[in-house]
Amino acid sequence: MDRVKCSVCEHVQPSSSVCRRCGRPLASAKPEPKSVVVEVVQVVEKQIVDHSGTFDEIERAIVLARIEKNGGNVSAAAQSLGLHRNTLLRKLREWRVPQNGAPAYKST
């Protein structure tokens, strides 16, 4: 059985959707490929309708949407995209996304 670690209280437990110690939702240990594909298709469709968007712009839109979906939690967003947190933070620095501003993000 897979074991997961809560990103808030760092309690390690068998895989479930909620931490037994603090009661917060746990991020899935594996990326969600289907939801990522659906998200990519939605962003690409929007870019096609707008007749704009390079690959980098589409990637940025997907990443920022995933961070927003995870309530600004960069670690959870990176995990859901199948990336390491440091990789996602590097991309945010390259894109000059502000830490204290819109879209806001936090590192746990």
Image (spheres, rainbow, N blue to C red):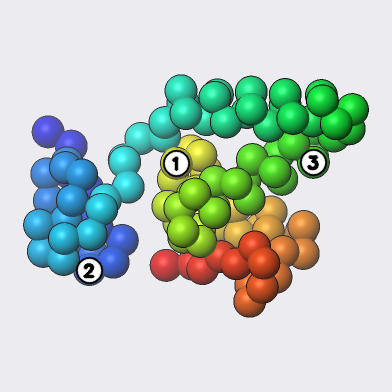
Q: Is residue 102 left or right of residue 17?
A: right
As helix, strand or loop, the secondary structure at mark 3 comes to helix
Residue 55, x across and y down, in percent: 80, 33
Give the distance between the C-alpha atoms of the residues marked 3 and 2, in whole angstroms: 35 Å
Measure the alpha-carbon separation of dots 2 and 1.
19 Å
Q: Give the labeled residue for mark 2.
A: 9
The residue shown at (35%, 35%) is 30
Quarter occupied by the N terminus:
top left
Q: Which quadrant of the structure image shows residue 44?
A: top right
User: Tag 1: residue type?
Assistant: Ser
Element at badge 2? loop
Characterize the local packing of mark 1: few (<14), some (14-19) or many (20 or more) Cα atoms within 10 angstroms: many
Specify whether 69 is left or right of 87.
left
Residue at label 3? 57
Q: Position of residue 34 (x, y in %)?
A: 46, 23
**35 shown above or below 24:** above
